[in-house]
Amino acid sequence: MYAATDSPSPPLMQKRLVRRHSFIVRLTHWINLLCFVFLLPSGLQIFNAYPQLHFGAYGADTDPALVSVGAEQRADGLRGYLRIGAVKIPTTGLLGISSDAGAETARAFPAWLTLPSYLDLAAGRRWHLFFAWLLVVNGTVYLAHGLYSGHFRRDLLLSWEQMKLRHLWQQLRDHACLHFPKGEEARRYNALQKMTYLLVVLLLLPLMVCTGLTMSPGMDAALPLLLDCFGGRASARTLHFIAAMLLVLFVAVHVTMVAASGPWNNLRSMLSGRYAIRTAEDAS
């Protein structure tokens, strides 16, 4: 006969709520979202007034465009297109044509994507400028809080281990396979999150603000250095649009990752600041 031996009990996974986001981080996050909701469609309204992008000090109809969106009349009706340099891409049904009151009209971005939906450059500018300045004030509060509280140093700076190519490559593979950190690791930003947030906070958003100011004649008079920095208003407008599209891409990826890694848990952490993690405890 063999004597019975005790086998270790499997660890029990227990859920624990931890503090993940401060009040200021949560508040500025939601104000940013509000600003983006109005800035994007109003910005597209402004773009529709002149649907071409140039590089250089000047940009006009007769100057070669880096990017243009439009429509051309053909025997079978209007056909939309996106032109990038010398390459023309058909975009009928997406860009170049909008259905207004049942009739098709040439319009870079369709009515349902712009604010207001009807063609009104002045109204689009008013919406855009109001929420642009709200974004600037909100961003200033976030930066001041991040520096004063140590949020940037504590939560966003990468460690030496996280900056190694091997670690970054593993992070890319994990995200591509939708494998997300568990337990204690989940309460902190991973390397890809830190790099992305720093890129947005320290590069894309400041670029958006500075190029936006460069397109203002009043700011050009007060700060002529802006024109020199960006090579003119036409270049600033192009950089502004590129930065906006990169921010749209960031938001799309961000929302996708939030949904894939646990929408309710992530949403709760941005509403109450509390994030649930599961840790193993020995049950023996």
Image: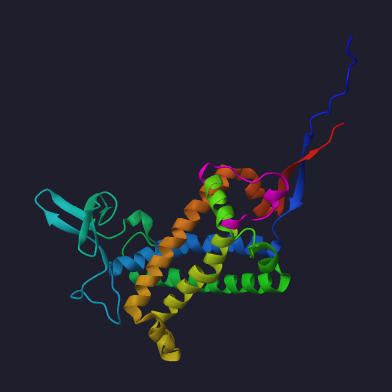
Q: Is residue 275 magenta?
A: no
Of the 4 image quadrants, the one containing the C terminus is top right
* Nearer to the camera, 189 or 80: 189
Which quarter of the rendering shows the N terminus? top right
Instruction: Tell me which residue sits at (37%, 60%) in the image.
Output: 114
Task: Please identify the quarter of the rendering in which residue 278 is found.
Answer: top right
State the image coordinates of residue 277 (x, y, percent, origin top left).
Answer: 72, 45
- Residue 234: image x %, image y %? 32, 77
Q: What residue occupies the far left of the structure in this picture?
A: 75
Instruction: Please tell me which residue is depicted at 85% across the width and 32% down the height of the picture.
Output: 283
Q: How is the image coloured?
A: rainbow
Query: Is 215 positioned to the left or the right of 263 in the image?
Result: left
Q: Is residue 57 above or below residue 72?
A: below
Location of residue 42 in the rendering, given as x and y in whole percent from the top left corner: 40, 65
**249 on left or right of 1:** left
Q: What percent of the width, then of the height, locates residue 122?
A: 36, 72
User: Can the viewer see residue 35 in this picture?
Assistant: yes
| Position of 114 relative to 121 (above/below) | above
In the rendered image, residue 181 lying in the magenta stretch gets the answer: yes
Residue for point 68% across, 73% down: 147
- Any part of residue 131 in sight: no
Give the residues in magenta: 176-192
Would residue 238 appear left or right of 40 to someone viewing this image? left
